[in-house]
Amino acid sequence: MGFARYLLFFLALSAFAANVKLFLKDGGYHLVREYKVEADRVRYYSIERSDWEEIPLTLVDLKRTETETTQRQAALAEEAKMITAEDKAERERANEVAKIPQGPGVHLVAGDKITTLKQAETEVHTNKGRSILKAVAPIPIVTGKATVEIKGEHSLNKVTSERPEFYISLAAEERFGIIRLAPSKGVRIVEKLTIMPVTKEIIEEQDQVEIFRQQIDDGLYKIWPIKPIPPGEYAVVEYTDGKVNIQVWDFTWSGP
């Protein structure tokens, strides 16, 4: 991509060198490769006739010719700067993508180090007990309240920043984000569920953290909290509203 852009630029530069408009005072112009003023005449190389020609200086609008030439040179120089900046950004993006492990998952960023987080096993807790939640299998539909939980009140994955950064790579287009977990009697509650009678509609309640999302590549995003998060238990999650297929990568922030 960068090479193609540079090629287009140099082609444009070549076209500029070969296509200077030598303006005349009557409003017309000659298309020339170059020109020079010699006493009372202007000598130029004609693009149309591929030869050197001369014209009286009094017929040439030198001011307009020089102004447009300067403007075109400035425009090409600015375009060159933009192409250089875009090419640098593209190389940096490619280098960034290359450092991230392939395949769906979540990766914690800590300086130059990238750590892949293990996906937590989640359970659905209803008044009839607990059942392991599988992303490809529907939950048992029981009218009333339920919770999605992971075992243990504290995560083994510790972050060292109040605004931790993560890469999340998606297998398919899904919603994702960072949520706060609620420790409760040996578990952490990921989200609360309300299963409506008759319709069996499932309403999911999450304690979401406001985040920035930066798309790095197709299905690959970098995310981090907008504001510093208080000490506590958290998780990066991927989910579909109303489907209870939430996937969880938990972490804890103990504070400075």
Image: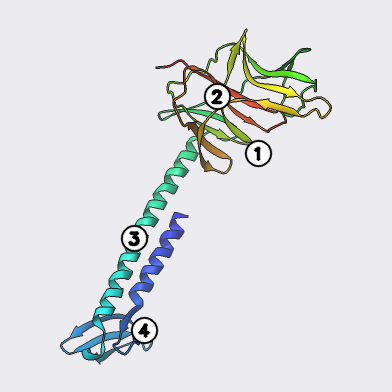
140 vs 10, nearest the viewer:
140
Residue at (44, 48) in percent of width and height = 90
State which tag comes first along the sequence, 2 or 1: 2
* Residue drawn at (72%, 30%) of the image: 243
How many numbered dots are placed on residues in this image?
4
Q: Which residue is mark 4?
A: 47
The residue type indicated by label 2 comes to Leu
- Residue at the far top: name it: 185
Residue topped by disc 1: 172
Indicate the amino acid at tag 3: Glu
Q: Which residue is mark 3?
A: 78
Residue highlighted by disc 2: 117
Q: Position of residue 93 (x, y in %)?
A: 46, 43
- Vertical arrangement, residue 212 with respect to residue 28, above or below: above
Is 222 situated above or below 54?
Answer: above
How far, Cα to Cα, is label 2 from label 1?
Answer: 19 Å
* Disc 1, SS: loop
Badge 1 crowding class, 10 Å Cα cut-off, few under 14, some 14 to 19, many 20 or more, is few
